[in-house]
């Protein structure tokens, strides 16, 4: 098989890039390790920045997002029984949209299928060859049958555990990492959200987040130990712990019900540099991970897609390699800012095992400052709604 751009990974980064490239007629093939159902089975992001929404519009996939997504003009932050609101729209002129990553992915799959885009599911043994030559290709197997895909460029959109990043030689690659000493236990339940906006809670028992997908589907998270397993937590134990971490009036009005999904995500900050090696480009979680506290992972994947799409388009339409040559630097400049915000917000909201009484006082002082200072709220709002591309 032959294509212009081979995409490894068929979740948001790969699908969105593939769908965008189809529009100006750039030929792509998306290779995905899992089945479509398994790709859609993972519950992850819920908050979309306007940059991602604009890309979905550009890709012709935003109709359902606009019909069903919920505009959020602000979010609540609590510590103990104190709760305050950061108004995103007042401070930046922009809201965020609550619309699940699963739905983004479903919309992209549907649009890709309708446009006749090529997605190969269930690929195994994916290997990148010749990314530093004029004849790159990707080898893989489907049902045990070896395949070879020749291409001009390879977009590594295969997440943190994919093969693309490893294809960049060790003497070229630099990795920066911070692993947090806790995870998030998340549940999805068919219950109305406790509040119409998200609540980020710092409590002496650890962080909690009240989020949602729509007015009858809630998503809640609690900070948990890295040794926890979802099976250790009954629904009753989860609800009891969540109630202890959010302000009392919210706990009182929380409607509980059976969980329809329960999973644990470890928290990590990670960046690999450069994001391009010759004819291989890294995009999204393949190149960087943020702790989910700032809701930046998928949104930062989207800014990579934006830069890479424009770079490839410029190359194919105008013969200009400038965008391609500048991709890594341009993407990384924004990535590091998202890393900073996610690290800062995570540090502000979680309990750390080695936190001293002084560290705790600093957290509370910083929360007090954020509660009472308009400039601090504005800085937070600007980052939360998404820095410009
Ligand atoms: P992935 O979603 O990891 O997709 C990579 C794909 O590549 C997968 O489908 C995988 O099967 C495939 N793949 C892997 N290896 C191979 C291979 N060898 N060959 C072929 N295919 C392969 N982000 C936000 O912006 N807002 C939020 O509110 C938010 N909340 C989150 C909550 C949680 C609990 C978690 C865990 C994450 C959250 N994120 C959020 C982060 C967001 O989910 C990720 O950043 C996003 O999924 C990245 O997309 P991706 O396409 O780059 O990578
Ligand atoms: C979610 O709804 O899954 C969600 C929302 C905000 C975050 C992280 C996750 O910061």
Image: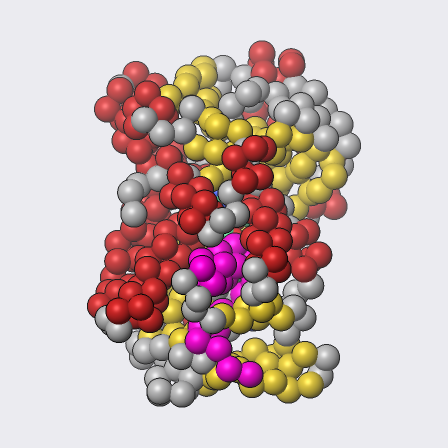
Residue 52, position as x, y percentages in the image: 43, 45
Query: What is the number of callouts on the image?
Result: 0
- In the image: residue 251, left or right of residue 303: right
Is residue 291 at least partly visible in the picture? no
Is residue 71 at least partly visible in the picture? yes
Q: Residue at x 45, y 15 (%)?
A: 82
Q: Residue at x 36, y 29 (%)?
A: 94
Q: Is residue 259 above or below residue 327?
A: above
Residue 126, position as x, y percentages in the image: 56, 78
Residue 282, position as x, y percentages in the image: 40, 66
Please state which of residues 298 and 153 is positioned toward the viewer in this rendering: 153
User: Which color scheme is applied?
Assistant: secondary structure
Q: Is residue 24 above or below residue 149?
A: above
> Does the stretch in magenta take in 22?
yes
Q: Residue at x 49, y 49 (%)?
A: 60
Please state which of residues 286 and 363 is positioned toward the viewer in this rendering: 286
> Does the stretch in magenta take in 10?
yes
Q: Is residue 139 above or below residue 322?
A: below
Please state which of residues 30 and 341 is positioned toward the viewer in this rendering: 30
Which region is colored magenta?
1-23
- In the image: residue 305, left or right of residue 374: right
Which corner quadrant of the image does residue 378 belong to?
A: top left
Q: Quadrant of the N terminus?
A: bottom right
Q: Residue at x 54, y 17 (%)?
A: 247
Please state which of residues 261 and 213 is positioned toward the viewer in this rendering: 213
Residue 10, position as x, y percentages in the image: 56, 62
């Amino acid at each position: 098989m032959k294509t212009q751009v081979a995409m490894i990974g068929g979740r948001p980064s790969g699908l969105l890039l593939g769908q965008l490239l189809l529009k100006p007629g750039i030929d792509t093939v998306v290779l995905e390790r899992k089945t479509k159902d398994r790709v859609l089975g993972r519950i992850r992001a819920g908050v979309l920045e306007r940059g991602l929404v604009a890309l979905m519009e550009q890709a012709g996939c935003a109709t359902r997002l606009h019909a069903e997504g919920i505009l959020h003009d602000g979010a609540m932050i609590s510590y103990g029984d104190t709760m305050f609101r950061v108004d995103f729209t007042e401070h930046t002129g922009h809201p965020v949209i609550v619309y699940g990553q699963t739905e983004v992915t479903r919309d992209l799959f549907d649009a890709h299928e309708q446009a006749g885009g090529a997605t190969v599911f269930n690929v195994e043994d994916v290997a990148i060859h010749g990314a530093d030559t004029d004849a790159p290709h990707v080898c893989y197997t489907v049902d045990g049958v070896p395949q070879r895909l020749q291409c001009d460029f390879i977009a590594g959109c295969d997440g943190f555990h994919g093969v693309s990043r490893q294809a960049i030689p060790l003497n070229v690659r630099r990795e920066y990492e911070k692993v947090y000493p806790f995870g998030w236990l998340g549940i999805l339940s068919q219950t109305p959200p406790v509040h119409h906006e998200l609540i980020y809670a710092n409590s002496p028992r650890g962080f909690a987040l009240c989020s949602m997908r729509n007015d009858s589907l809630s998503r809640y998270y609690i900070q948990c130990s890295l040794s926890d397993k979802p099976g250790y937590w009954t629904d009753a134990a989860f609800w009891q712990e969540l109630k202890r971490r959010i302000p009392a009036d919210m706990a009182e009005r929380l409607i509980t019900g059976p969980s329809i999904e329960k999973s644990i995500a470890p928290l990590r900050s990670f960046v690999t540099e450069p994001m391009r090696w010759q004819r291989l480009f890294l995009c999204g979680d393949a190149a960087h991970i943020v702790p989910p506290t700032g809701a930046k992972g998928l949104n930062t994947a989207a800014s990579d897609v934006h830069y890479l799409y424009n770079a490839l388009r410029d190359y194919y339409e105008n013969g200009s390699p400038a965008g391609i040559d500048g991709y890594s630097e341009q993407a990384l400049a924004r990535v590091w800012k998202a890393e900073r915000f996610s690290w800062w917000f995570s540090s502000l909201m979680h309990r750390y095992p080695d936190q001293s009484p002084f560290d705790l006082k600093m957290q509370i002082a910083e929360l007090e400052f954020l509660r009472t200072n308009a400039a601090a709220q504005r800085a937070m709002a600007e980052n939360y709604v998404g820095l410009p591309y």
